[in-house]
Amino acid sequence: MRSLSYRIEQPSIATPAAVFDTLIDVERWPNWVPSLVEASWERRGAPDTGVGGIRRTRSRVLGASLTLREEILGGTRPHYHSYNLLSHALGFDSYQAAVQIEERANGCLIIWTATFSTRIPGWGRPLQLIARSQIKRLAAALAREAQQIAR
């Protein structure tokens, strides 16, 4: 299995703390995440970081329901959040992601990286493109929502 990855960079005028707090406030995700129907903690993790927690999300994708479970692996408020995908949805295998939030003069830079593999021959590059596109939309929505909350 070949490992694939992607990296998204999204500037925000919000503070790193506002971005981080928006990211771990899972119950509010349906208010701002495109196509998300519901989100909740299946198991709550550490109060300030979510580490050790498992979040569950349900989306509508092309008319079908898609449920994902993600375990929070690491976190340092307000600069770092990492997780892995527990569901083997859409052909992803060994999916791990990290969100770094770097402070900048006028806000912050959200850097979202992920590495994964797939066991389905020929699906690697298409899954990489789909995941990158979805996370790019998610990072932009996260930046917008954190900016709204910070006002």
Image (cartoon, helix red, strand yellow):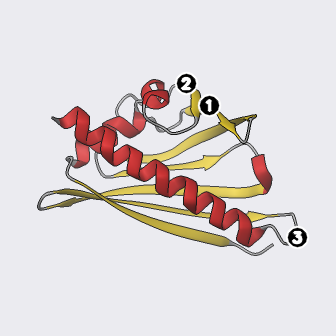
Please give the name of the residue rendered at 48% of the width and 52% of the height, measured from the top-left corner: 137
32 in relation to 117, above or below: above
What's the CA distance linking mark 1 and mark 2? 6 Å
How packed mark 1 is, by other alpha carbons closer than 10 Å (few <14, some 14-19, many 20 or more), is: some
Q: Is residue 77 visible?
A: no
Tell me the tag on residue 56. 1
The answer to whether residue 67 is seen in the rendering is yes
CA–CA distance in space, label 2 to label 3: 33 Å
Q: Amino acid at mark 1?
A: Arg
In the image as oriented, which residue stretches furthest toward the front?
A: 63
Q: CA distance from mark 3 to mark 1?
A: 28 Å
Q: Nearer the viewer, residue 143 or 42?
A: 143
Query: Does the CB distance between marks 1 and 2 fall below 8 Å?
Result: yes
SS label for mark 1:
strand
Name the residue carrying label 2.
Answer: 40
Q: Does label 3 or label 1 sit earlier along the sequence? A: 1
Residue 93 placement, left or right of 75: right
Where residue 69 sits: x, y (%)? 66, 37
Check disc 3: other Cα within 10 Å, few if <14, some if 14-19, many if 20+.
few
Tag 3 or tag 2, which sits nearer the N-term?
2
List the single residue furthest toward the right: 121
Whether residue 63 sits left or right of residue 12 in the image: it is right
Please report the residue visible at 31 percent of the width from the left and 52 percent of the height from the top: 79
Residue with the mark numbered 3? 121
Classify mark 2: residues with Cα within 10 Å, few (<14), some (14-19) or many (20+): some
